[in-house]
Image (tube, rainbow, N blue to C red):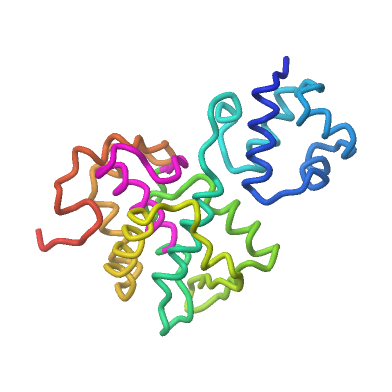
Amino acid sequence: MGNTTQLASRITKWRTDSGLTQQEVADKLGLSRQRYILVEKGERDLSTTELTVLSDLFGIMPDDLLRDPIDMAKFRQMYFACLKFAYDENCEGVKITKLAKLLYLSDFTNFYQQLAPMSGVKYRRMEYGPVADAFFTLTDELYYRGKINVTPKEKAKIISSTSREQDNFDKLSTNELGLIQEICEVWKHKRTEEIVNFTHEQLPWRSCRDGEFIPYELIIQEEPDHVFKPTSR
């Protein structure tokens, strides 16, 4: 498959945004670091199989490598912002399912208000509500790098930050950070089941099939008072 300078730059951005080294990506591809460097220089073609390996590694779809990348660095900061603002003293962190939903509500509420998501990551319709395709890949990467703790507790996993990244939000605007904080305050002390049920009631989840990507545009059809806050309806 023919490679281009544009594809090479996208791969490089996905790698750096994912916090991976050239050697780590080379190992996944079964290449030496020297040969992988040629990929990032646009001097080595990638096979379809190799593109699939890269997309799995970055938590994206293969087609995403062929178009402008999402802002993974921003999604990472959104992740830490949710950990900070939704921190529950009772469980000493944030339940993983609730964390996934807070990220979804942040991206989709921003789209509702600004006609643009914060990060642009793709969300799938899953059993327990919408989940970002990159969510579990990022969680695994942060855990193995010692940036977060993952603690099993009462049939749930509790995520807590161990990194100073929790205070670095330079890629988020003041309004975006304020929106994340507002959403987290709404759901911080509510049960995980409540936020899951809330996302199940929304049009984006109800309009898609299991496993399908959820178009951001669907949130525009939602009632204004049902975008991220629970109501009595």
What residue is at 23 percent from the left and 42 percent from the top? 203
Quadrant location of the N terminus in the rendered image = top right
Whether 221 is among the magenta residues is no
Seen as rendered, the residue at the extreme bottom is 90
Rendered view: 5 above or below 183: above
Q: Residue furthest top?
A: 2
Question: Looking at this view, is 14 or 5 the one in front?
Answer: 5
Residue 41: percent from the left, percent from the top? 78, 27
Quarter of the C terminus within the rendering? bottom left
Left or right of residue 228, residue 129 in this image: right
Q: Which residue is pictured at 37% across the width and 48% down the height?
A: 107
Q: How many numbered tags mark residues here?
A: 0
The residue depicted at 36 percent of the width and 53 percent of the height is 176
As drawn, which residue projects farthest toward the left?
A: 233
Q: Residue at x 31, y 58 (%)?
A: 179
Q: Quadrant of residue 37?
A: top right
Is 45 on the left-hand or right-hand side of 163? right
Q: Which residues are magenta?
A: 99-124
Task: Provide the major secondary structure of the magenta segment.
Answer: helix
Residue 52 point in image, percent of width and height: 67, 31
**109 left or right, relative to 96:** left
Q: Quadrant of residue 39?
A: top right
Q: Relative to residue 213, is residue 41 depicted above or below?
A: above
Q: Position of residue 175 (x, y in %)?
A: 33, 54
Q: Is residue 5 above or below residue 21?
A: above
